[in-house]
């Protein structure tokens, strides 16, 4: 898969670990995140990955900040993004199966490396179930169009 990854200063190390982990599994991972511990503003990276994913160039995105929350809120401001914070693998599976999340987010200050790997594995192995879930996802687009 082609995966866009992004992060702020709180998550440089975990980003690198997850990027390497995914590349070893054969995925193509493009880094949109920061690579130093210098303080940055997470909305910038949420937006970058959000735009990259909705462009269609990537199959999905992964966002990491301290909690996963701020960066996912930013990504969700991009029309067409469905970014979901996941702190364990069951949520990661369900956000794909039910919500067709196109970005997952987690917090480097919340989950360790092994849990983070289990989150990305669960998400990437899951499949959207469609059916009644598609109707609800269509409602997301309707909400967006009412705002624009
Ligand atoms: C940065 O200190 C921190 O606020 C950020 O990484 C994130 O946790 C925000 O939601």
Image (cartoon, helix red, strand yellow):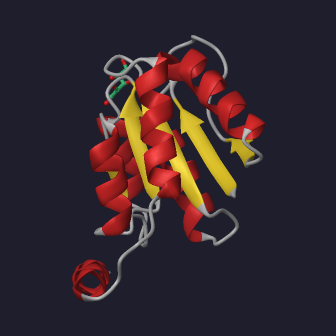
Q: Position of residue 65 (x, y in %)?
A: 42, 28
Q: Total label count?
A: 0
**Residue 147 at least partly seen:** no
Q: Nearer the viewer, residue 47 or 86?
A: 86
Q: Position of residue 103 (x, y in %)?
A: 46, 54
22 relative position to 45: left or right:
right
- Residue 57 occupies which quadrant of the picture? bottom right
Quadrant of the displayed image that contains ligand 1: top left
**Quadrant of the snapshot with the N terminus:** bottom right
88 relative position to 64: left or right:
left
In percent of the image, x 31 and y 36: which residue is there?
88
In percent of the image, x 50 and y 15: which residue is there?
39
In percent of the image, x 35 and y 41: which residue is there?
89
In percent of the image, x 58 and y 62: which residue is there?
53
123 relative position to 12: left or right:
left
Q: Position of residue 76 (x, y in %)?
A: 36, 58
- Residue 83 occupies which quadrant of the picture? bottom left
Q: Nearer the viewer, residue 16 or 88?
A: 88
**Residue 100 at least partly seen:** yes
Q: Position of residue 48 (x, y in %)?
A: 57, 50
Q: Which residue is most to the top?
A: 37
**Quadrant of the snapshot with the C terminus:** bottom left
From this view, report whether residue 86 is shown above or below residue 3: above
């Amino acid at each position: 898969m082609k995966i866009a990854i992004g992060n702020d200063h709180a998550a440089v190390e975990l980003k690198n670990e997850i990027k390497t982990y995914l590349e070893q599994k054969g995925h193509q991972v493009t880094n949109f995140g920061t690579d130093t511990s210098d303080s940055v503003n997470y909305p910038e990276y949420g937006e970058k990955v959000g735009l990259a994913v909705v462009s269609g160039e990537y199959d999905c995105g992964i966002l990491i900040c301290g909690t996963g929350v701020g960066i996912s809120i930013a990504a969700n401001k991009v029309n067409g993004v469905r970014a979901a914070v996941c702190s364990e693998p069951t949520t990661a599976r369900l956000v794909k199966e039910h919500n067709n999340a196109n970005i997952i987010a987690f917090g480097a200050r919340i989950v360790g490396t092994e849990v983070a790997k289990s989150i990305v594995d669960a998400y990437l192995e899951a499949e959207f179930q469609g059916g009644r879930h598609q109707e609800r996802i269509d409602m997301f687009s309707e909400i967006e169009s009412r705002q624009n």
